[in-house]
Image: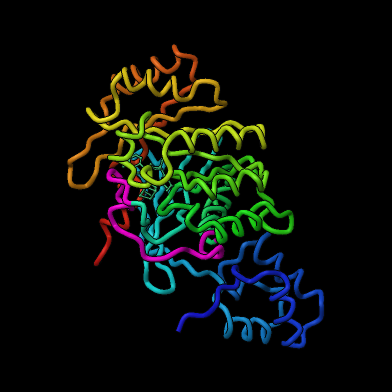
């Protein structure tokens, strides 16, 4: 039988449990220090707490709800990918990317995803369930511990792994609250990015929360006709409404929006489309992030070649749109969204 996850419990609940177990008030602080400052992965590590209390907690709760089942490191050692088993045996992925001065964790928010984007391995898997805030936080804590063992620190967290974060709004926001809380993981909001396919009501809700967390919008096409063939949800939330909502995010937060655009060979990578994209984004505070598509597993869609990616960037830049090219990372380790979990299913 699976137990409730300790990282899913709020302060009030923890306080009530400790009281029920006859513990003095200061135990809460000790417990929280163990969870968020030391980030212990095992009850045995909490040496400041009495053994009887640890046993009682272990009877009621799971401390760390994700089990590292498989790790793959890319040949250049720049990308590590972890496959985690959840308590109910579902699988999720977390990717840790190492840059010169940055270490970025790319975390999952759902098992699978219901949005069905045609180029996305997670989308093709279908949807199983939302992750809890504790399951989301555990991926971050795992990466923090991993880096700390090498004397390094996690610098960025991107909600860009498996799943659509804005379809799991409450748990995602609760994980972020704990991530940025000084008594939690004390991580800077500006170093966190949520990527969405464009769930309009949630973009608005997120905007009104006025957080300093970055917003990334996965666009992949500059007109509704093309976008709807790649991203089915475009039928419900068309481009114009998403661009308007993104501008409002900038008005409220003074932060630029990251526009993600995966270049698919012969599909969305012509210079005419770059021009159309420049027109669409005109006047918006944004940064376009281009990436050549990680090829779909059935081989039907391919990433654009380097020359086309660069030509697309150059055209956008010429039109005054700030653009960067995201390095393809860890292709040989299936680092594309959802690709490792797909390859491991049934193993
Ligand atoms: N559901 C959210 C976040 C997870 S996907 C979203 O769609 O934004 C994270 C990013 O990976 C998105 O920009 C998504 O479009 C992109 N992506 C998915 N499959 C990809 C692939 N095969 N190659 C390149 N990028 C991909
Ligand atoms: Fe879901 Fe994002 Fe993949 Fe689309 S790209 S299917 S929204 S995870």
Residue at 24% of width from left, 44% of height from top?
296
Above or below 276: residue 200: below
The structure residue drawn at horizontal position 47% and vertical position 48%, both measured from the top left corner, is 199
Q: Nearer the viewer, residue 31 or 308?
A: 308
Look at the image and say whether residue 318 sits in the magenta stretch: no
Please report the residue visible at 31 percent of the width from the left and 53 percent of the height from the top: 340
Colour pattern of the rendering: rainbow
Name the side, left or right, on which 266 lies relative to 281.
left
Q: Is residue 117 located in the magenta-colored stretch of the structure?
A: yes
Q: Residue at x 46, y 66 (%)?
A: 66
- As rendered, which of 323 and 199 lies closer to the eye? 199
Quarter where residue 90 is shown: bottom left
Q: Which residues are magenta?
A: 116-137
Viewer-closest of 285 and 109? 285
Pick the residue in front: 51 or 33: 33
Where residue 150 appears, as percent x and y from the top left, is 54, 49
């Amino acid at each position: 039988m699976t137990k409730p996850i300790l990282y899913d419990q709020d302060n009030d609940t923890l306080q009530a449990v400790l009281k029920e177990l006859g513990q003095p008030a200061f135990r809460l602080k000790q417990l929280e220090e163990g969870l968020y400052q030391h980030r212990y992965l095992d009850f045995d590590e909490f040496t400041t707490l009495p053994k009887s209390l640890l046993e009682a907690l272990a009877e009621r709760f799971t401390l760390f709800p994700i089990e590292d089942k498989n790790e793959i490191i890319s040949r250049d050692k720049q990308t590590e990918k972890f496959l985690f088993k959840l308590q109910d045996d579902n699988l999720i992925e977390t990717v840790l990317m190492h840059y010169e001065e940055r270490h970025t964790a790319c975390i999952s928010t759902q098992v699978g995803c219901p949005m069905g984007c045609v180029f996305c391995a997670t989308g093709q898997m279908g949807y199983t369930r939302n992750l809890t805030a504790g399951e989301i936080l555990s991926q971050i804590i795992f990466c923090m511990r991993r880096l700390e063992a090498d004397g390094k620190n996690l610098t960025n967290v991107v909600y860009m792994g498996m799943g659509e974060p804005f379809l799991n709004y409450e748990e995602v926001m609760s994980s972020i609250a704990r991530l940025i809380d000084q008594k939690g993981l004390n991580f800077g909001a500006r170093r966190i990015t949520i990527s969405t396919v464009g769930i309009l009501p949630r973009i608005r809700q997120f905007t009104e929360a006025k957080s300093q967390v970055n917003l990334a919008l996965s666009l992949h096409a500059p007109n509704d006709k093309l976008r709807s063939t790649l991203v089915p949800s475009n039928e419900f939330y068309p481009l114009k409404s998403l661009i308007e909502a993104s501008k409002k995010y900038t008005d409220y937060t003074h932060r630029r929006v990251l526009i993600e655009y995966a270049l698919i060979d012969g599909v969305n990578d012509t210079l005419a489309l770059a021009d159309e994209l420049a027109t669409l984004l005109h006047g918006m505070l944004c940064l376009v992030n281009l990436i050549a598509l990680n090829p779909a597993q059935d081989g039907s869609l391919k990433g654009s070649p380097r020359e086309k990616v660069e030509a697309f960037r150059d055209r956008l830049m010429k039109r005054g749109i700030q653009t960067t090219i995201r390095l393809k990372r860890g292709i040989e380790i299936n680092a594309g969204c959802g690709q490792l979990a797909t390859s491991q299913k049934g193993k």
